[in-house]
Image (cartoon, rainbow, N blue to C red):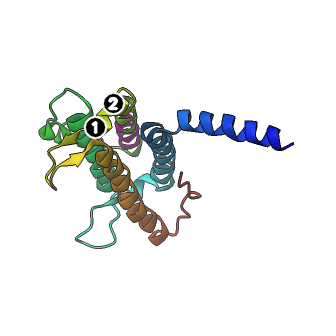
Amino acid sequence: MNRLLIVFFLISGSIMSQQFTPKDAFLEKWKNSQEYLLKIAEQMPEDKYDFKPTEREMDFKNQLLHIRGNMLWLGTTHFSEEKFDKNALKENLPETKSETIKTLKEAFEYVYTQVQNTDDDDFKIEVDFFAGHKSKLQILNLLQDHVTHHRGQLIVYLNLNGIEPPRYVGW
């Protein structure tokens, strides 16, 4: 029995170390974050997409577009060879709820693909960032933290409109 447990732990530890690189952990969480945010975006009725709790806040739709813009900026700047065009974010803005959700989903998928195609060793590379030199691994954390921050605001927007948010997914 003890030998069997030892073999099991050795095998499972080996399998886990192969499945849970920082990149793999991020990609799993990123997919779950995408699913959760898209559910939140679906929950809000289209006629409430312009809701904002105070004058200084972005409305619901612009919170989603802000999240999208940050994803495209960081995903392009730090995980692709492309040059990020900030002005392109202001072109062809989605008008409807379904268009907004579609562009948000595309941004999630873009970042997923860019990160998936990044070599594991590249996450150690430091990049110039407005907050100082950061590793690409830190940029991954920023990507997720930014989504989480604004998603929390969107949950408040739902609650203020009497809409029950989707069940939390945090992994």
Does residue 92 appear anywhere in the picture?
no
Q: Is the magenta region chiefly helix, strand or loop?
A: helix
Return the residue nearer the eye: 87 or 16: 16
- Residue at label 1? 75
Q: CA distance from mark 1 to mark 2?
A: 7 Å
- Can you give x and y, in whole percent of width and height, for residue 156 in the image? 43, 68
Determine which of the numbered discs, if any, sits on residue 114 in the image.
2
- Quarter holding residue 80: top left
Q: Is 11 situated above or below 168?
A: above
- Picture coordinates of residue 47, whole percent (x, y): 40, 56
Residue in the image at 35% along x and 59% along y: 150
Residue visible at 52% across and 39% down? 20
Q: Residue at x 74, y 41 (%)?
A: 6
Which residues are drawn in magenta? 100-107
Whether pointer 1 and pointer 2 mark residues with C-beta atoms closer than 8 Å, the reply is: yes
Left of 109 or right of it: where is 167? right
Q: Is residue 8 left or right of residue 166?
A: right
Residue 138 image position (x, y, % from top left) = 30, 49
With 164 as the anchor, is 112 left or right in this view?
left
